[in-house]
Amino acid sequence: MEAVLQTKGLLSLPSNLKTRALYPSQGLKHRLFASKPKTFTGFSLSSNGVPKFPTFVSKPSGFSPKDRNLHICRAEAAAEADGQPLFGEEADRPKFLGIELATLKKIVPLGLMFFCILFNYTILRDTKDVLVVTAKGSSAEIIPFLKTWVNLPMAVGFMLLYTKLANVLSKQALFYTVIVPFIAFFGAFGFVLYPLSNYIHPEAFADKLLNVLGPRFLGPLAIMRIWTFCLFYVMAELWGSVVISVLFWGFANQMLQIVLALHFAFGWADVWYECKITTVDEAKRFYPLFGLGANVALIFSGRTVKYFSNLRKNLGPGVDGWAISLKGMMSIVVLMGLAICLCYWWVNAYVPLPTRSKKKKEKPKMTTMESLKFLVSSRYIRDLATLVVAYGISINLVEVTWKSKLKAQFPSPNEYSAFMGDFSTATGIATFTMMLLSQFIFEKYGWGVAAKITPTVLLLTGVGFFSLILFGGPLAPTLAQFGMTPLLAAVYVGALQNIFSKSAKYSLFDPCKEMAYIPLDEDTKVKGKAAIDVVCNPLGKSGGALIQQFMILTFGSLANSTPYLGGILLVIVLAWLAAAKSLDTQFTALRREEELEKEMERAAVKIPVVSQEAGNDSLASATALDPTTGGLSEPSKPHKN
């Protein structure tokens, strides 16, 4: 049987796609290799046969062993005459470790690109905080102002420029035009801008303004005082949003359209948005595993930061150890950037790009007012939006307060950077572990428990963190027995909070958020995503920064605002938990409706069986298709000879 699997309306595969049974379901295997089929009269597949027939793939699903159901997926099988191998047969194409070399030519360079990009991102993320927090005349109070008044406008401006460049440049030219300035800037910063920072930063002018305006304006004035460091901060932020999200994933989705669609057809990861078939059962199994590779880069880059930060210990007196460390780390960033370009060039030169068989439907554009109206109109989307906004605000409130204590404990840039290296490594290990455990959590406890773990972690660790800050004096004698001061204990508890909240976010919160869209109808799903992108994502990211700015300008400093920030965090996390509970109830109800519809559909339609008989593939079932009407009809009785 020369045929390819093509899904109708849900997944579109090229006609010449070569299919490999990687993780075939039992239902598919039964239909392909049934030994004693019944046949339809006058209706079969041939090498050039055009007739089409519906098939149904049955797969157990559900959130617990007690709640199993069958997800039914309509598909078409069309015969091909171009010599494609049969299902289940060994292909002639060369393989390595069971994987076709043609596939490895795509996967290996893309994997190297992803590793290098994330390796750089971790180094840049840790370094940008060290620069702006530990600089003379600055503190962690600069971060809320920097994110709102510098980072956001530059991100918007960059995307406008990117849109214009995309209209006039080819894809390859656009990739190099965007990534090369990043590489050049980071190299120039380590070897030129930072060594000259004492000469080009307006220290005296900033001091005069600070004396006039008062200490509550320390954060805004620090942006002007250390403008090159702030520029590095913004470029590091843009590396994550532009190089990872726009450049890499855009290229990867283009390269892997065929491969990933094939893998999805046999039950692999459905995280790639080109794949139109998505079930909750598959999502809960494969979403958490998606970021495992990213955390390998996180672990290695964290050790790299630690190594270069400790170079100061081997240098003589009077030597700027942080400058030496910065040159070493930026050299690695440049080398990794060049490796990214090399991998990109090699793929474009030696790997043929797949052509899209179907144009993807564009997401509708919604204005802010339209998004707000849609959010208000749907309780389900409203609860989902609360989760997104609450996470963004909560993690921002905790992170900035923790970094202010981190600077107090480690005022030296090298000490601060070394701690951040350990922090990144621990985050990678914790996230890797949580992603492995998350599949068990989804299977054993379901969506509702998984959705509540992240806010619960933030709540418990937040109580401990803010308690150490507010009531550190009475606790000092007890902590001294463990060799710690209240400040050091707060730093460690804050680090644990950030590590566990980030690992829970990547392994549980993000999968839960994406899975929550699955039971919705197509219109609500698309509009809900658009509304959350327009309103909730920016509000979550900037909401915490705006709250902190208000507190700093009102109470004079971040330290004076700590009790109020702790109270705000408590209210937001409790609202988050309430929204998760409400969403779990609605999610479960929608899932039951979906399962009931599919059970009714399965009860009404018998499953046809594909088999091989006398060299000619035929269909068999208790119910037949009427080739003229496309409907169901009773099978004709066999003729007696």
Image: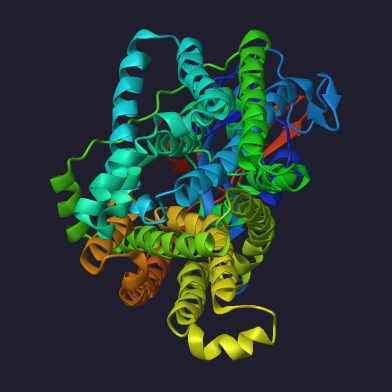
Q: Position of residue 448 (x, y in %)?
A: 47, 71
Q: Quadrant of the N terminus?
A: top right
Q: Quadrant of residue 470?
A: bottom left
* In the rendered image, the vertical position of residue 178 relative to residue 210, given as above or below: above
Question: Residue 133's spot in the image, x, y percent?
Answer: 46, 51
Near-viewer residue (428 or 625) = 428
How many numbered discs, if any? 0
Q: Is residue 401 left or right of residue 341?
A: left
- Closest to the observer, 76 or 314: 314
| Horizontal and vertical percent position of residue 568 | 31, 73
Above/below status of 287 relative to 169:
below
Vertical position of residue 545 compared to residue 303: above or below:
below
Quadrant location of the C terminus? top right
| Picture coordinates of residue 82, whole percent (x, y) | 67, 12
Classify residue 285 by image quadrant: bottom right
> For the point 34% across and 42% down, which residue is it?
223
Render colour scheme: rainbow
Residue ID at (30%, 43%):
206
Q: Quick check: can you spot residue 255? A: yes
The answer to whether residue 40 shows anywhere in this view is no
- Closer to the camera in the image, 103 or 331: 331
507 vs 177, nearest the viewer? 177
